[in-house]
Image (cartoon, rainbow, N blue to C red):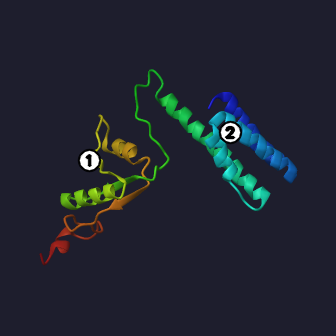
Amino acid sequence: MNDKQRQQLSVYVDEADNASSEALLSRWMGKVSEFLKQSYGPDGATYFERLKNPNVYDEVALKVGHLEGLLAKDEGNQIADARNSPGQGPQEEISTTPNGRRVFVVHGHDGEVKESVARFLEKLGLDPIILHEQPNQGRTIIEKFEVSSADIAFAVVLLTPDDVGSAASQPLGNLCAGS
């Protein structure tokens, strides 16, 4: 989005707050829809038009929220562009929107169970993300985790008897007694 488009979206958000009648709000929705069609294409306008509510003021609130989301998304893109600008060196972009298909798999030492769950998730059409399988690219473990888990929709945590989990105050020897 260019500066002019960003500025126009901000104007539309302000106009909605100042509209005092349903007729003004209806005209406002038409203007915004046409702007979105020109700036984002037919799909951008269609999504905006489908935001409906029986109460026109609630509908406008939904639509204003959508416009504010577009502005926030653009602001995030500008920050990412600044990070990747010359002199900064190439950096991997971190998405903050879960894509709905990526699943983080947290596991212990039972490799067979981990692989079995990963293959099962793939059969469901999901994309299992296992941290140690992701490239390091010179990053620390926490940086690798941040990049790998940024757009994760959800996680599967495997709890198997190959690892011991307990309170820090509980001695490990007591957990193993009787084995």
Question: How would you rate the neighbour count of disc 2 (Cα within 10 Å): few for under 14, some for 14-19, many for 20 or more?
Answer: many
Q: Earlier in the sequence, mark 1 or mark 2?
A: 2
The x and y percentages for residue 80 are 50, 34
Q: Is residue 37 above or below residue 167?
A: above
| Residue furthest top in the image | 87
- Residue 98 visible in the displayed image: yes
Name the side, left or right, on which 45 lies relative to 86: right
The x and y percentages for residue 13 are 74, 43
Residue 179 lies in quadrant: bottom left
Decide which of 169, 42 is in the foreground and name it.
42
Residue under the image location 40 percent in, 25 percent down: 89
Residue 116 lies in quadrant: bottom left
Name the side, left or right, on which 54 lies relative to 3: right
Residue under the image location 82 percent in, 45 percent down: 27
- Residue located beneath label 1 in the image: 132
The x and y percentages for residue 95 are 47, 42
The x and y percentages for residue 166 are 28, 68
- Residue located beneath label 2 in the image: 36
Q: Is residue 75 above or below residue 115?
A: above
Residue under the image location 79 percent in, 57 percent down: 56
C-alpha separation, residue under disc 1 versus residue under disc 2: 42 Å
Q: Is residue 159 above or below residue 178?
A: above
Residue type marked 2 = Leu
Residue type marked 1 = His
- Residue 20 visible in the displayed image: no
Question: How would you rate the neighbour count of disc 1 (Cα within 10 Å): few for under 14, some for 14-19, many for 20 or more?
Answer: few
